[in-house]
Image: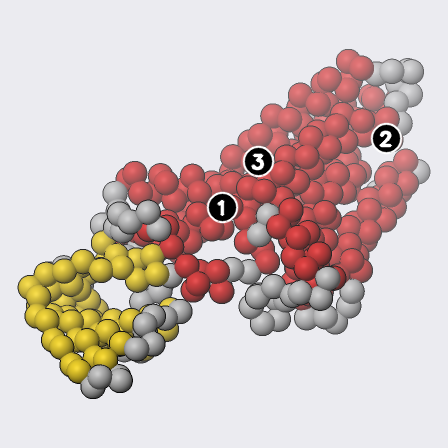
Amino acid sequence: MVAPRILWRYILRDVFFHSLLGLGLMSLLLVVQNVLRFIEDLLSAGAGWMGLVQLVAVILPSYLAFAIPTALLFGILLAFGRMSADGEIVAIRASGVSVPRLLPPVLLLAALAALVTGHLVWEIEPRSHDRMKSLVREFAKSVRIIKPGSFQEFGDHMLYVHEQGDETCPLRGVLIGDFRDDERSLFISAKCGSVVEDTEPEGAGSIGFELTEGSIHFSAVEKKRYRKIRFARMHTTLDLSEFIHAHKRPRDFTFSELLELERQFEAGDPPELRGKTGRAGVQTQIHRRLAFPMASVLLAIVAVPLGIRPLRSGRSAGALTAIAVMGLYWLLFSAGQLAAEGRYAPAWLSVWSPNVVVLLAGFWLIRRTVRGET
């Protein structure tokens, strides 16, 4: 059989629908798992169904990059496992079609999955991380930023909240210091406060406070003057743009931004990044964005011979094998990424090694299957 196009279409359709089912299940599992992490903040903020839908819409693209290769592996194992259990693989091989000639439709789907995954990890995933942080801060009334009982510095501002209160007084004992003017300091103290939506143009990088029963204190250092103004209610904002930028990690940058950061490192003008995630983190993310999309192709090569093997334990073994193979791959990939960030090995070696191991394992399994070994 020179060109088994009918067989290829059959395999393509079967693998596609099984992968689509796996993608739905994996996406649901990942989204539910991560929404549960923020459910307490959502409930405390009083976010309704629309808030939950917005959070799911932001989380989903971030985790599709993990779900797509897993779903494809799941679909291939299930499709070929069914064909093997029903005797179709025996009939196909008896007609003169070898195992390698069953790969083209699978590799076509894997290439499409790699392209989609590449776009996700290059552009969508980092933007999703930023949007997720913004939504959680908005829904949770900045619980993750405001730490009661401790002084916090945000650029030229200082914030202190004594404790969290109830619905009538969410924040008790609020103190805000403004040190932008070297000649005059400004302090705002209030008995109660609450975080509200900031309507200012720069609101994306700031928090709005509604303060009640407080006072504003002015002091001029050189003129030794002091002034106090009482208020019943006032609105003020706290700029967090520097705080947000300082806590932005390499994984939060798009691929083009990572390349620009690496260019700055090479030019001797390193940008401001967090601790150990300096140049090592940038290089790790660059190689990760290049190596990660290849997971779909590599796992597809491994899945075909694993699916063709006779499965006496039932069709559920396909799902169990998918979980085991995918777990091992992610374990190797995560270990390589940690080794690269910790500078235990070059980034290219640490990140690409799992792909090389899986590729060699796939070729070995295909060769073993061709020889008829089980």
Residue 122 lies, in percent from the top left, at 63, 44
Numbered circle sitting on residue 99: 2
Real-space CA distance between mark 2 and mark 1, rounded to the nearest whole angstrom: 40 Å
Dot 2 crowding, Cα within 10 Å, few <14, some 14–19, many 20+ = some
Residue 167 lies, in percent from the top left, at 14, 59
Badge 3 or badge 1: first in the primary sequence: 3
Q: Callout 1, which amino acid? A: Ser
Give the side of residue 208 with respect to residue 373, left or right. left
Numbered circle sitting on residue 128: 1
Q: Looking at this view, is 11 or 66 the one in front?
A: 66
Q: Quadrant of the C terminus?
A: top right
Real-space CA distance between mark 3 and mark 1, rounded to the nearest whole angstrom: 22 Å
Q: Quadrant of the N terminus?
A: top right
In this orientation, does residue 191 appear? no
Please give the count of numbered marks on the rendered protein.
3
Q: Residue 217's image quarter?
A: bottom left
Residue with the mark numbered 3: 22
- The scheme the figure's colours follow is secondary structure
Badge 2 or badge 3: first in the primary sequence: 3
Q: Secondary structure at mark 3?
A: helix
Q: Residue 155's image quarter?
A: bottom left
In this orientation, does residue 59 appear? yes
Dot 3 crowding, Cα within 10 Å, few <14, some 14–19, many 20+ = many
Task: Identify whether 102 is placed above or below 130.
Answer: above
Residue 5 lies, in percent from the top left, at 80, 15
Dot 1 crowding, Cα within 10 Å, few <14, some 14–19, many 20+ = many
Q: Secondary structure at mark 1?
A: helix
Q: Callout 3, which amino acid? A: Gly
Give the side of residue 350 with respect to residue 73, left or right. right
The residue at the point 8 percent across, 70 percent down is 230
Numbered circle sitting on residue 150: none
